[in-house]
Amino acid sequence: MTHTTLSTSPWWTNMQENLPLLRLLHPKQYASAVGISLAIGLTLSWIVLAAGVAPLWAATAMTLLLLLPAGFFKWRDDYRRYGRTVMFLSVLLTAQGLHTIEHLIQWTQYHILYWTMRQSNGLLSPANAEWVHFVWNWLVLLVVLLLMFGGMRHVWMWLLLAVAAFHAVEHTYTFIRYQIILRELTAMDILNVTAQGLPGIVGRDGWLARSEWTRGTWICSIPGLTTAVRLDVHFWWNAIEMTLLILAGHVALRRRMQGEPLP
């Protein structure tokens, strides 16, 4: 009697051939380390939360830190096996995937659990800050450019570049507004009021909704473009960005499998 593992089964082999991103993202020999790290992280998180020792964001950060070593060794192997460009793709897919999950949790808190906008901060509430969004999205744009310089140039990558660039510009606009308002509040000796969560270019009270150039035009009639709350705006930014990243990665890896190696 023979024993067929998942990694050697014909079904799994066909899945990896049709969906090469599964092969890339699979932790392979580090699967056990990932499972153990996740189990330990979730257990410790439950203990510290039940005991009231730490808030939810700290428990979440602890779990992610426990998973990081396995991720580091997995990405090191990706570099050795596939090269720098595919390794960057693997890192970006993982990071942006977790980031999109965080936005999904915020969306659920607001729309399903009916929490207030201020309460709907996801699992890592301190990361829901203007400077974090600013730095994160410019890093994403930088990695997208590195992927394109590495050979990933096709229609989905160009669309991803456009969306990532506009997303970075959106957060640059909100970051600048945040700094301006923060300085105005400080000048008035108002130190206990936060300027986080300001509208950006799109969405309710955003630049498009308030600008004399666009107010009352057909642009304002596009559903959500000038009416969506900030939480929804950035949920859809990340959903679109993640979808394009998956499509771009799929096409790039399929081309590699067909004999068009990436640098």
Image (tube, rainbow, N blue to C red):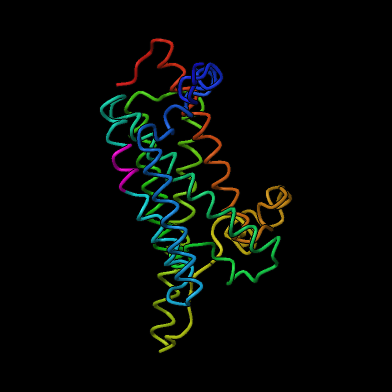
User: Residue drawn at (33%, 37%), measured in percent from left and top?
Assistant: 74
**Residue 78: quadrant of the picture:** top left
Q: Is residue 186 above or below residue 74?
A: below
Prevalent SS, magenta region? helix
Q: Residue furthest front?
A: 1
The reply, left or right, for residue 171 in relation to residue 212 is left
Instruction: Give the image location of residue 179, x and y in percent.
Output: 40, 70
73 drawn magenta = yes
Q: Is residue 174 above or below residue 182?
A: above
* Identity of the residue drawn at 44% across and 87% down: 190
Residue 132 % position (x, y): 40, 60
Residue ranking furthest to the top: 259
Decide: is 217 above or below 251.
below
Return the x and y of residue 164 as percentages of the image width and height. 47, 42
Q: Residue furthest bottom?
A: 189
Does residue 121 belong to the magenta stretch? no
Lateral position of residue 64 relative to residue 6, left or right? left
Q: Over which residues does the magenta segment extend?
A: 69-74
Q: Residue at x 40, y 52 (%)?
A: 136
- Relative to 243, is 262 on the left or the right? left
Q: Nearer the viewer, residue 135 or 7?
A: 7
The quadrant the C terminus occupies is top left
Residue 24 figure quarter: top left
Q: Return the residue nearer the eye: 119 or 201.
A: 119
